[in-house]
Amino acid sequence: MNYAGKRVLLLDGYGRQVPSLLHQLHGLGCKVTTICESKLDVGYTSRYPVKKVVIHGIRENATLYRKAIEKELCEEKYDVIFPVLEKATDICLSDNMQTKFPDLKIIAAPREAFLKAYDKQQTMALCMKNNIPCPLTKRADETWSEYLAKVSFPLAIKPRKGSGSAGFKKIHNRQELEQFMASGTLIVENYVIQEFIPQNKYMCNCYVMMDDEHNPMYSVAIQTYRWYPVDGGPGCFARTVDQPLVTENAIKLFKALDWSGFGQVSFMMDSRDNIPKVIEINGRVSAGIKMVEYAGCTPVKYMMDRAFGQKMIPKKEKIKEGLGLRYFHTDILWLLKSPDRFRTVPSWFDFRKSKDYIFSWADPIPFFSYAIEHTMTYQKDMEKRKHS
């Protein structure tokens, strides 16, 4: 199907995945409007949108965001709405949105599958039910005594909803756990409690496109070699790899979810038994979509095909190994902070066959506006990612 001239409302203009999405939508000939929070957002500084809307406060205020989206949809005629992050996706998947705008195509997974994937507790329960390797996790119906009898410290405590390492806490012993619980900070129902997987090997993400019959159209596995903060955080350099077990379990998990559309499963290689274990699902459009684009999988074209009910053709070509993706804004911080800066493999100074999450010679300004914007919020971002 030809998508030239289709009007697309692209949300979350501050996300670092937005430049790749804009590039792909531009290549399809779509006319894109972005909703941003700041004129420094990559969705605003990019040359590709035909219209840019700035609404301050939408990152934190879901009600304000919903009103801004609905106002734009009422004022302009759009064929497609394209949410990127969790909050916008949740807004777009509400029954009210589809009822108000019945002809609007929504780029997102089915709502029930998305909500299960967004909740790490449900993700872990689904893994354990389907024999998919994951960290030993406290079940909702399990007492502390039962759980602590079969797990060893340290433990990882994470918000049930969220992504990256924000809100993550490492608990080293029982006394520390009791102190943490006594402080009132830990509301068990809002957190996932699981064994801590040592981050001394590597992370691996698998990006999959599933059709509406829950069949995989392609999968791209990438291995993370560096992350920032250096003791555990979002990846800052990764390469495509051939990881059959990771791919197999990612597809198995998406099938168990009745998933359709684009999604990502994150794995941590456990050095104790050399088994990759599921850490989380990203039902949103994650920044790694740039790697999927680089690997030649045309993810946005597949998303548009699914939204418009077009038959999706599985990709048959093998994904090239060794393609690199660098998040330069944090990779430079890794270089400054890591004691392994000159020993790491692959070398930090090897830029061959690699691209940046944000930078593009065809659309360079977002790289610099993103740097300025996040320099101003750096301290706040790092506070969220303290592990202690």
Image (cartoon, rainbow, N blue to C red):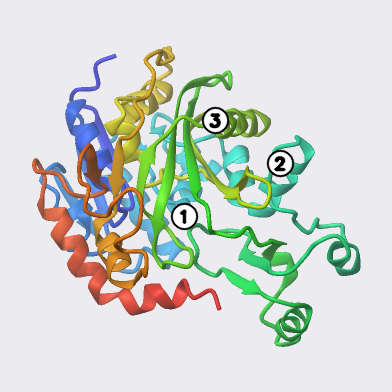
- Horizontal and vertical percent for residue 364? 10, 50
User: Where does the image place residue 366, in percent across and percent down from the top left?
Assistant: 16, 54
Q: Secondary structure at mark 1?
A: helix
| Label 1 to label 2: alpha-carbon separation | 24 Å
Question: What is the quadrant of the C terminus in the image?
Answer: bottom right
**Count of residue discs:** 3
Circle 1: is it few (<14), some (14-19), or many (20+) Cα within 10 Å? some
Which residue occupies the foreground of this view, 377 or 212?
377
Tell whether 66 sits left or right of 298. Answer: right
Q: Is residue 283 left or right of residue 343?
A: right
Marks 2 and 3, how far apart at CA = 14 Å
Q: Which mark is residue 87?
A: 1
Q: Are marks 2 and 3 in contact (CB under 8 Å)?
A: no
**Three-letter code for the amino acid on which mark 2 is drawn:** Cys
Which quadrant: the N terminus?
top left
| Of callouts 1 and 2, the N-terminal one | 1
Tell me residue 145's x, y (percent). Answer: 90, 68
Residue on which disc 3 sits? 247
Q: Is residue 208 above or below residue 376?
A: above
Relative to 36, residue 229 above or below: below
- What amino acid is found at the position of numbered circle 1 in the picture? Lys
Q: Residue at x 60, y 45 (%)?
A: 117
**Residue hosting label 2:** 127
